[in-house]
């Protein structure tokens, strides 16, 4: 039951940043707002992670030609020739390149598409 209350509290707090202001006005402390050992307030690290977008990372592989990789970037992502070539060279020289960024679901689709093209790709948090 406490876990459900905590989950609902977190949803309300995220939906309205001043949600807990009413409790502060009633003299409740942060310790009184915590349930068990779990604090209601998110820690700074999780807040920073939430701000970082997801990225699709394409990795260098020994199989695909550089021209094919650039072609995939142009075809799938709609990058112009220069941008596709730049990303392809980054994959080739540095071993990987972040080729797209955004919400997790869209990046999962991009990773799956890269796999269908035969490229090695993963999902990661942006820098």
Image (cartoon, rainbow, N blue to C red):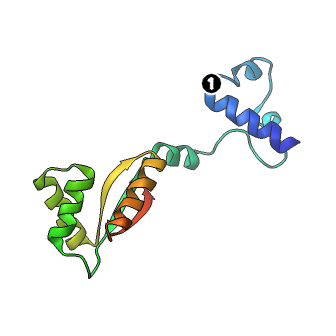
Looking at the rendered image, the quarter that the C terminus falls into is bottom left
| Furthest residue in direction right, as rendered | 1
Residue at the (62%, 32%) spot, across then down:
14
Which quadrant would residue 118 be assigned to in this image? bottom left
Expressed as whole percent of the image width and height from the top left, the position of residue 23 reads: 77, 22
User: In the rendered view, does 106 fall on the left or right side of 79?
Assistant: right
Name the one closer to the observer, 102 or 75. Answer: 75
Which quadrant would residue 97 be assigned to in this image? bottom left
Residue position marked by numbered label 1 in the rendering: 16
Expressed as whole percent of the image width and height from the top left, the position of residue 122 reads: 42, 64
Residue at the (34%, 63%) spot, across then down:
114
| Furthest residue in direction front, as rendered | 116
Expressed as whole percent of the image width and height from the top left, the position of residue 90 reads: 21, 65
Which quadrant would residue 41 be assigned to in this image? top right
Name the one closer to the observer, 86 or 94. Answer: 86
Expressed as whole percent of the image width and height from the top left, the position of residue 91 reads: 24, 68
């Amino acid at each position: 039951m406490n876990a459900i209350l905590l989950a609902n509290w977190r949803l309300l707090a995220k939906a309205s940043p001043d949600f807990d202001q009413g409790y502060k006005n009633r003299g409740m402390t942060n310790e009184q707002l915590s349930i068990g050992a779990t604090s209601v307030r998110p820690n700074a690290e999780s807040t920073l992670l939430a701000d970082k977008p997801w990225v699709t990372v394409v990795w260098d592989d020994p199989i695909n030609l550089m021209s094919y990789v650039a072609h995939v970037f142009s075809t799938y992502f709609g990058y112009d020739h220069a941008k596709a070539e730049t990303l392809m060279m980054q994959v080739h020289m540095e071993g990987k390149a972040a080729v797209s960024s955004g919400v997790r679901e869209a990046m999962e689709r991009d990773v799956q598409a890269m796999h269908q093209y035969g490229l090695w790709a993963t999902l990661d948090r942006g820098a």
